[in-house]
Image (cartoon, rainbow, N blue to C red):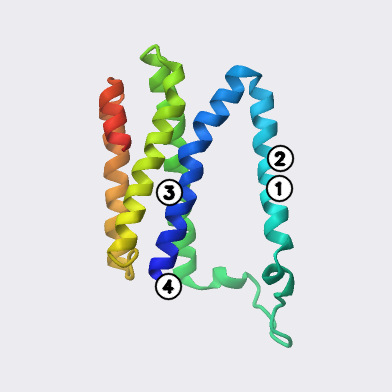
Amino acid sequence: MRSAYAADASASELTWIAGPPLALGLGAAWSTGAALAAAGVILLAGTAVFAAEPASRRWRPAEGHTRPRGGSLNAPGIRTLVLALVAVGIVFGAAEVGVAAAAETLQSTAIAGPLLALWGVGSLAGGVLATRLGGGTDSAGGLTIVLAALAAGHLALAAAAGSLAALALTLF
């Protein structure tokens, strides 16, 4: 199961590899509004395809089972994961904005897309390696190590922001 999740995460990295250069290319060739609209159409289409899948259509909640108010958030472990993943999302978003800002500061705005794609390539390589090693973490201690490594890697981006080569290497 862990290997399957790691493989799925690796496959999703392909969108991070291809997406930024495609969006920036469309924005440069046509307009940023067109790039945003295209991304919205792709997201809507993907959601519709997922919702149309037979497995999605067949699922129903267990009958006679009432959910407590707050649902899954009543579990302390789920609350911890939600908080951690919200923080991870903020860090990823800040990194994307920071890479674009660094590229602009270094007088090379066109490199932002390829840099973000390189980040996806590095993540894909890491995902493949994790899959080969049997998947991700399976304990709170393992998650703590992964989150600490994630924080260290993103802090290293601040130090690398003065050079395109250093930024590329750190992103990978």
Q: Check whether the beta carbons of the residues at disc 4 and disc 2 lie within 8 A of each other.
A: no
In-image side of 130 versus 117 (left or right): left
Amino acid at pointer 2: Val
Amino acid at pointer 3: Val
User: Mark 4 sits on what residue?
Assistant: 1
What's the distance in space between the residues labelled 3 and 1, CA to CA? 26 Å
Q: Residue at x 71, y 69 (%)?
A: 54
What's the distance in space between the residues labelled 4 and 3, CA to CA? 23 Å
Name the mark nearer the viewer: 2 or 3.
2
What's the distance in space between the residues labelled 4 and 2, CA to CA? 32 Å
Q: Residue at x 70, y 56 (%)?
A: 49
Quadrant housing residue 169: top left
SS category of the residue bearing label 4: loop
SS category of the residue bearing label 2: helix
* Dot 3 alpha-carbon crowd within 10 angstroms: few under 14, some 14 to 19, many 20 or more: some
Outermost bottom residue: 64
User: Mark 3 sits on what residue?
Assistant: 88
Q: Is residue 55 above or below residue 26?
A: below
Amino acid at pointer 1: Ala
What's the distance in space between the residues labelled 4 and 1, CA to CA? 28 Å
Name the mark on residue 81. Answer: none
User: Mark 1 sits on what residue?
Assistant: 45
SS category of the residue bearing label 1: helix
In-image side of 37 versus 25 (left or right): right
Q: Check whether the beta carbons of the residues at disc 2 and disc 3 lie within 8 A of each other.
A: no
Name the mark on residue 41. Answer: 2
